Amino acid sequence: LTSQRVNLRLILVSGKTQDFIFSPNDSAMDIAKHVFDNWPLGWEEEQVGSASILRLIFQGRFLHGSVTLGALKLPPGRTTVMHLVARETLPEPNSHGENLSLALSGCLTHPIT
């Protein structure tokens, strides 16, 4: 049922977007693997060598691999926007370093259509 699915619009640093549909039970790691295995046409320049370096950013925070969409209480049936970046490691939980702002520079200036 569509009402039990979560629509995600993933945005790359380049500003390219793609919509995906997931279950509330899917984790950030599941999403990264699915996107890696089903890399969208038009994203070839951003292709990475492994799903393990794909990271999701939601509301300015990196999501750890085990976090599920249901745990984030995302509204089913509505589109939620997240950034998708390639990064080997996650920052420390309390880190407010410039890496995040560098990763997102340019992303937030692209309108969501």
Image: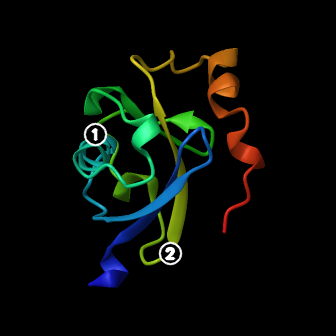
Residue 112 lies left or right of residue 89; in this view the side is: right
Quarter of the figure that contains the C terminus:
bottom right
N-terminal label among 1 and 2: 1
Residue 16 lies left or right of residue 109; in this view the side is: left
In the foreground, 71 or 91: 91
Vertical arrangement, residue 5 with respect to residue 69, above or below: below
Vertical arrangement, residue 19 with respect to residue 41, above or below: below
Residue behind mark 2: 78
Q: Farthest residue in the right direction?
A: 109
Specify the amino acid type for callout 1: Met
Count the marks: how many? Answer: 2
Residue name at image x 49 percent, y 34 percent: 85
Residue 108 shows in this picture: yes
Q: CA distance from mark 1 to mark 2?
A: 21 Å
**Image quadrant assignment for residue 40:** bottom left
For mark 1, does the 10 Å Cα neighbourhood hold few (<14), some (14 to 19), or many (20 or more) residues? many
- x, y percent for residue 90: 44, 20
Q: The residue tagged with tag 1: helix, strand or loop? A: helix
- x, y percent for residue 28: 34, 43
Residue 103 lies left or right of residue 78; in this view the side is: right
**Image quadrant assignment for residue 51:** top left
- x, y percent for residue 100: 63, 25
- x, y percent for residue 77: 43, 78
Quarter of the figure that contains the N terminus:
bottom left
Marker disc for residue 10: none
Residue 50 lies left or right of residue 16; in this view the side is: left
Residue 63 shows in this picture: no
Marker disc for residue 29: 1
